[in-house]
Each structure stands twice: as C-alpha cells, then as structure tokens.
C-alpha cells in the first residue's frame, strides 16, 4: 500500500510542484488549500504524513497543528514556512510539528524528510514484521527499509515499489507493460525511458557494495530477478 501524503497550502504553485514530485516518487497525494479543509482531510483520510504550510489565512498552520495534537492525532507533520527565525521554528515544534523546512527549499530535501518521517512512524508503531527476502536482499514492507548483505540501501518510494514488485515475483520475467501498469499506471505520460532509468538506478544501488547483479534484462521480454549471471 502506497503511503498517503496530505499537502495543506494556499499557494497553488507549491501544491502543484509538490503533488507532481511526490506522485512521481510513488506516493498517493491529496491536497487542501486552507487550514479548515486540511483539518477535515486529516480526519477523513488518515494520511501517513502531513506537509503543512504555516502562513495561511484564517486557520494558519500553527492552529492546524495545535488542533490536530489536541484532538489526539499523531500523524507526522512537516511544516513549511517562509520565515527562518528561531522563534518561529520553536513555536511550530512546541505545538507538535515533527520537522520544519524553510522556503525556498529543494524538492529532494523535502522528499528525504518525508522518507525519514515515514521510517520514524513505522518504527514507533512496531513495524518490521513483514519482510521479503531473496538471496542476500531483504525488503521490509512495514519500515520500508531495504538491505543487501546487511547494508542498508537508500531507495526512493518509486524504487522501493519497483524492487518490491520484483521480489514478489522472483525468477519470473516481468514485461515492460506489466511493470509500467503496476508501478506507474496506464495514465502515466512521462518519459518513455522512465523504466529503464529506474532499473539502472536500482542496479546501481543494489550492486554498490559489490553484490552480483540480480535484476537482469531478458531481451524482447522484459526483466527478471534472479541470481545467476
């Protein structure tokens, strides 16, 4: 199941940028353009992480965070703000925010902080029981951690999904169309070589400590997870 990220921000440009970036990494994304709608979205949707802008009219981010915590919600909150004053950050953290990011920010940093919040949430809930193993490669579904030979691999959400698909189907050839359908969906309209790019990145990360190649190309058929070369 894909992690669900809720963005609460009144800036349509920020929402559009974050929606595209998070969705491309494999997250389900919902949005709200004001604090009141954001509070309702949390109550009705049970998101895994909330990305919350501070400066919004009427119900601002501080008030949203305060109401969430007073209502008993433990959803991880990443606050966004244009102000870098220490007092501003401290106020948000004191109200129950889990992390803080100052605008303008790099999308890569936001994605890294979202991954960290998801890992922390899984660890706190006792995750790590569901593991998929193939040879020396282990993928933990709950904590979303991957190791090879005991060494942790840092994967994006989309890389994790792709590797999970292979590990659920070891020694089975997966066609390009099947992978694109399972991971990106039929409505994906991005670059035509996106799968090849992700395969290359997965190979680099799974082989970076000297491990043999596990994801192999079957010409004219697709890709397969198997240990023999």
Image (cartoon, rainbow, N blue to C red):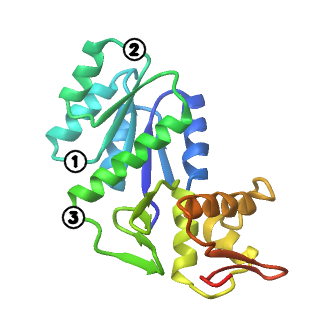
The label on residue 53 is none
Q: Nearer the viewer, residue 141 or 28?
A: 141
Give the structural element (helix, strand or loop) at label 3: loop
Q: Nearer the viewer, mark 2 or mark 3?
A: 3
Look at mark 1 in the image and give the residue it sits on. Answer: 74
Query: Of all residues shown, which one is farthest toward the bottom?
Result: 171
Q: Say if residue 41 shows up in the picture.
A: no
Q: Earlier in the sequence, mark 3 or mark 1?
A: 1
Residue 123 horizontal/vertical position (percent): 25, 58
Q: Say if residue 153 shows up in the picture.
A: yes
Q: What's the CA distance linking mark 3 and mark 1?
A: 15 Å
Image quadrant in which the C terminus is located: bottom right
Look at mark 3 in the image and give the residue it sits on. Answer: 126
Please give the name of the residue rendered at 48% of the width and 48% of the height, measured from the top-left corner. Answer: 30
Q: What's the CA distance linking mark 2 and mark 3?
A: 35 Å
Please give the name of the residue rendered at 42% of the width and 49% of the height, measured from the top-left corner. Answer: 115
Q: Quadrant of residue 50?
A: top left
Q: What's the CA distance linking mark 1 and mark 2?
A: 25 Å
Residue 195 horizontal/vertical position (percent): 72, 63
Q: Are marks 1 and 2 in contact (CB under 8 Å)?
A: no
* On screen, residue 216 above or below 92: below
Give the structural element (helix, strand or loop) at label 1: loop
Residue 56 horizontal/vertical position (percent): 40, 23
Residue 180 horizontal/vertical position (percent): 69, 69
* On screen, residue 193 above or below 32: below
Give the structural element (helix, strand or loop) at label 2: loop
Please give the name of the residue rendered at 69% of the width and 85% of the height, measured from the top-left corner. Answer: 173
Look at mark 2 in the image and give the residue it sits on. Answer: 83
Image quadrant in which the N terminus is located: bottom left
């Amino acid at each position: 199941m894909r992690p669900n990220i809720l963005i609460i921000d009144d800036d349509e440009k920020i929402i559009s940028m974050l929606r595209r970036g998070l969705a491309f990494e494999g997250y389900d994304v919902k949005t709200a353009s004001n604090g009141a709608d954001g509070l309702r979205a949390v109550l009705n949707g049970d998101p895994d992480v909330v990305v919350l802008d501070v400066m919004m009219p009427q119900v601002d981010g501080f008030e949203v965070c305060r109401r969430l915590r007073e209502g008993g919600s433990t959803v991880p909150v990443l606050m966004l703000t244009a102000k870098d004053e220490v007092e501003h950050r401290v106020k948000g953290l004191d109200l129950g925010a889990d992390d803080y990011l100052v605008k303008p920010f790099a999308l890569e940093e936001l994605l890294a902080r979202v991954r960290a919040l998801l890992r922390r949430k899984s660890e706190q809930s006792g995750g790590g029981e569901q593991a998929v193993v193939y040879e020396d490669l282990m993928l933990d579904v709950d904590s979303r951690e991957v190791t090879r030979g005991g060494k942790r691999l840092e994967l994006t959400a989309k890389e994790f999904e792709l590797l999970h698909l292979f590990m659920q189907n070891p020694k089975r050839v997966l066609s390009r169309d099947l992978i694109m359908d399972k991971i990106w969906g039929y409505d994906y309209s991005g670059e035509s070589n996106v799968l090849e790019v992700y395969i290359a990145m997965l190979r680099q990360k799974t082989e970076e400590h000297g491990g043999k190649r596990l994801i192999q190309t079957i010409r004219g058929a697709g890709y397969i997870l198997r240990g023999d070369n």
